[in-house]
Amino acid sequence: MDSGDFSLGGFLRRHRDLLRPDRRPDARRRVPGARRDEIARAAGISTGHYARLEQDRAARPSWQTVAALARALHLDDEATAQLYRLARPAAHRSRPARRERVSPEVRRLMDGWNGVAAIVVDTAQDVLARNAPASVLHGRFTRDGNVPHMVFLDPAAAEHFGDWNRTAADVVADLRRAVREAPDDPRLTTLVGELSIHSAPFRRLWAARETTTIARRRLRLFHPEVGELHLTTEVFAIARAAGQRLVTYQAEPGSASADALVLLGTLAARTGITPGAEA
């Protein structure tokens, strides 16, 4: 029987029973499968909580718990994706419409920068606004309304980001921070669900040991019109709009990358991109 035929509890029971003795936390016992307390201990949750999950009597588990269960049960990518689908079926729903707006003052600041690409993101890393150079810089992306979607779900990411692995790890670290600060935010819950279901690299990073993101770092990007760019990012919290952050992409003055950023602004003017337009 395919694992898709099971409820969450049935899925957990089936995969617990499938664990070989040498794969269980307690390898000394030579009996099929694993006990509930062994899986609970390996996942870092109480035996009672795990038992309720197997009995389909518990509230939907957090994404952190789902990731821990996938590790404890030694699931492969396909089974892990199925676990996420069963644990958080609401992740299939469309994300709510964005309501946040960027202030005119911040827009004017962004639009006044000729050689700096800039975007404004919210807690869920939705792109609320971008200036003309940033619009052209991200012009190849079809999922450019959300940074994690760009990195994990858009085909353009593989060529755009010179160090995709580092970028992906930073995005996950930033998302972890947001979930930690607002664990009940439905937008974050849905976003993590979408990425967990559709991106195996995201699932692996989300389940891995937590890393720390930094407000400033160097990026190597590629754009087909201007070539390779070596940029530095800075992230600024917008005091009058809780959760909003201004992200800038700058180049060393006088460098080829600085010239490329200016060219991106020129290309935006040629193609009729309006500075400050919402993504």
Image (cartoon, rainbow, N blue to C red):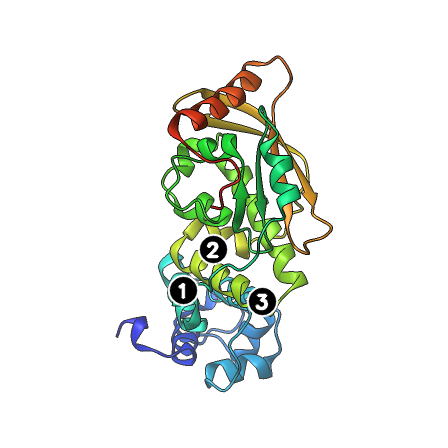
Q: Quadrant of residue 108?
A: top right
CA separation in Å, label 3 and label 2:
20 Å
- Mark whose residue sits in front, 2 or 1: 1
In the image, what residue occupies the spot 50% across and 80% down?
Answer: 53
Which numbered circle lies on residue 185? 3
- Mark whose residue sits in front, 3 or 2: 3
Q: What residue is disc 1 on?
A: 94
Q: If you read the primary sequence from the N terminus, does the residue marked by circle 1 or circle 3 appear first?
A: 1
Q: What residue is disc 2 on?
A: 203
Q: Amino acid at mark 2?
A: Arg
CA separation in Å, label 2 and label 1:
20 Å
Which element type, helix, strand or loop, lies under badge 2? helix
In the image, what residue occupies the spot 49% across and 36% down?
Answer: 164
In the image, what residue occupies the spot 53% across and 23% down?
Answer: 261
Q: Amino acid at mark 3?
A: Asp
- Mark 3 touching mark 2, by CB under 8 A? no
Q: If you read the primary sequence from the N terminus, does the residue marked by circle 3 or circle 2 appear first?
A: 3
Q: In this view of the protein, can residue 163 be seen by the observer?
A: no
Which element type, helix, strand or loop, lies under badge 3? loop
Number of residue marks: 3
88 or 118, which lies in front? 118
Q: Amino acid at mark 1?
A: Ser
Q: Position of residue 213 (x, y in %)?
A: 65, 44
Q: In this view of the protein, can residue 14 be seen by the observer?
A: yes
Q: Is residue 193 above or below residue 35?
A: above
- Mark 1 touching mark 3, by CB under 8 A? no
Report crowding for label 3: few under 14, some 14 to 19, many 20 or more residues within 10 A (C-alpha).
few
